[in-house]
Image: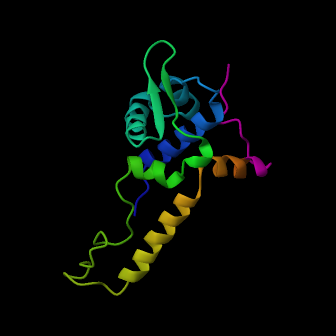
Amino acid sequence: MNLTTKGKYAVTAALDLAINEKDTSFLKIADVAKRQSIPPSYLEQIFNHLRKADILTASRGPKGGFKLSRPSEDIMIGEIITAVERRMDATQCSGEGTCNAGSICVAHNLWTELNESINSFLMEKSLKDVLNSRRENPKEKDNFLIATG
């Protein structure tokens, strides 16, 4: 099981789009990349995956860029991670049951349950849920995602 930087960046960038979206306007990759300290070329790859997964919509031209394809309450964190990561898996056998020289290891069911719990957790959390929980905790600063200028 491995959540890479790509998955973390994808979630962070989607949260940035959710916070900074304004009706029909598209946001530039360069602006999101700058706000979130993500290399623009890497973010472009991530956004292409998210677009193919119907999480983002893209537009070309001077006013082009990216925006969420659906309301933030309809986009689950699990969808975002699945769009850019390989399947997250705590088992050594990719769930095949061949982890112990071709047979099921003694901990196989434990790792399978962990996979199911993680997937369930991530598919129950929307972008809006994450943003709302952040706003409810006054100790956390919310300025890291807010557009400047």
Q: Is residue 133 left or right of residue 65?
A: right
Left or right: 36 as drawn, with respect to 147: left
Q: Based on the displayed image, in which of its 4 quarters is residue 25 positioned?
A: top right
Image location (x, y in percent) of residue 124: 57, 60
- Residue 122: say if magenta: no
Query: Image height check: is 114 above or below 41?
Result: below
| Residue at position x 71%, y 52% in the image | 133
Q: Position of residue 83 (x, y in %)?
A: 40, 48
Q: Quadrant of residue 21?
A: top right
Asked if the stretch drawn in magenta spans residue 148, the answer is yes
Q: Dividing the image into 4 quarters, which one contains the C terminus? A: top right
Give above or below for 34 relative to 51. above
How is colour applied across the structure in the image?
rainbow
At x 47% / y 48%, what residue is drawn? 80
Residue 12: x and y in percent read 55, 42
Say whether residue 17 is left or right of residue 61: right
58, 139: nearer the viewer: 58
Percent coordinates x, y for residue 105 in the rendering: 30, 84
Magenta span covers which residues? 135-149
Apparent side of residue 96 relative to residue 11 in the rendered image (left or right): left
Going by the picture, which residue comes out furthest to the right?
138
Vertical side of 109 occupied by 7: above or below: above
- Residue at the (38%, 51%) spot, across then down: 85
Helix, strand or loop for the magenta stretch, by majority: loop
Farthest residue toward the left?
102
Split into 4 quadrants, where in the image is the N terminus?
bottom left
